Image: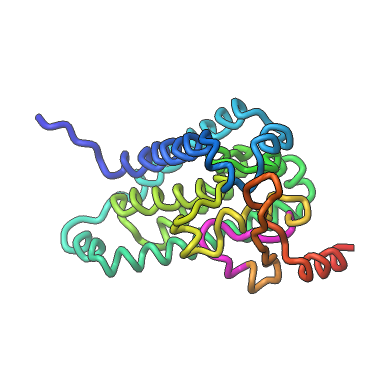
Amino acid sequence: MAFTISDELLGTFVPILVYWLYSGLYVLLGSFDKLDNYRLHSRIDEDEKNLVSKADVVKGVLLQQFFQAIVAILLFAVTGNGTGAEANQQSSPIAIARQFVIAMLVMDTWQYFMHRYMHHNKFLYRHIHSLHHRLVVPYAFGALYNHPIEGLLNDTIGGALSFLVSGMSPRVSIFFFSFATIKTVDDHCGLWLPGNLFHVFFKNNTAYHDIHHQLYGSKYNFAQPFFVMWDRILGTYMPYSLEKRPDGGFEALATKDYKQTKDYKDN
């Protein structure tokens, strides 16, 4: 009897595997001295400015992925899967493209408002979201380093809503959530590599999110992981420029005029 793995099981665990494979690729790339010229922060800053050890980051991410897997299994069990003509219709290229776009918009909307609220609610920020901002200098496998409650509210529920509202099948979800995972890891990778298609097609990218992790940008650039529309619509968009650092690499800096305006408003 042939051994088969269900789409539901693949939809649960493939994105987790993709997370570690893709972030592992960035760890490997970051070990090459020649690529230091593409870093947004120096290796010294990565070691000295972050307030949490990499071992604790790995433990935190694995804990979040454990809860994420449980919710995914329950969600697939409750929703079931379409069959017959309905499933065939939903698997057409046009239908899949529509589901991807809807899921991206739903995920962005949920995560923007949840993320922003966690910054503006002092209790939630101090006890929950500040855990993620211990990574002042983001790196790839720290992308999902969050408090377990934030992981549940922001990432897991946001993903569940994207799945439900878009109407995608478990098979399509394998590809969508793997794509979303790769995008999230890339946004935290800390490298501005030439030819990175995410930097070409998305304004919400590594440098954009790096601004948010800096103290002066912590109330801006909440949008994640795909678009910047909510930041633009609601006035939390902070434009930036990439400048060469004297010691090599790049630095994402808020544009001078905008930063002065922002400092005035905050005061």
Question: Along the line of sight, which residue is nearer the eye, 68 or 200?
Answer: 200
Q: Position of residue 74 (x, y in %)?
A: 40, 41
Task: Please tell me whether residue 147 is drawn above or below residue 55 in the rendered image.
Answer: below
Point out the image quarter for the N terminus: top left
Q: Residue at x 19, y 36 (%)?
A: 4
The C terminus - image quarter? bottom right
Residue occupying image coordinates x 64% and y 46% = 248
Q: Residue furthest right?
A: 267
**Vertically, is 127 above or below 172?**
above
> Which is nearer the eye, 121 or 50?
50
Corner quadrant of residue 117: bottom right
- Number of callouts: 0
* Magenta region, residue range: 218-230
Q: Is residue 123 visible?
A: yes
- Predominant SS along the magenta part: loop
- Whether residue 160 appears in magenta in the rendering, the answer is no
Image quadrant in which you'd find residue 142: top right
Which residue is found at the position 69% from the left and 44% from the top? 247
Q: Is residue 152 left or right of residue 12?
A: right
Indicate the quadrant where residue 57 lies. top right
* Relative horizontal placement of residue 120, taking residue 108 as reference (left or right): right
Residue 70 visible in the displayed image:
no
**Any magenta on residue 222?**
yes
- Expressed as whole percent of the image width and height from the top left, the position of residue 86 reads 21, 63
Residue 217, relative to residue 147: is it above or below?
below
Residue 1 lies left or right of residue 26; in this view the side is left
View extreme (bottom): residue:
233
Q: Residue 254, position in %: x, y? A: 72, 62
Residue 92 screen position, x and y as percent: 23, 65
Q: Nearer the viewer, residue 157 or 31?
A: 31
Colour logic: rainbow
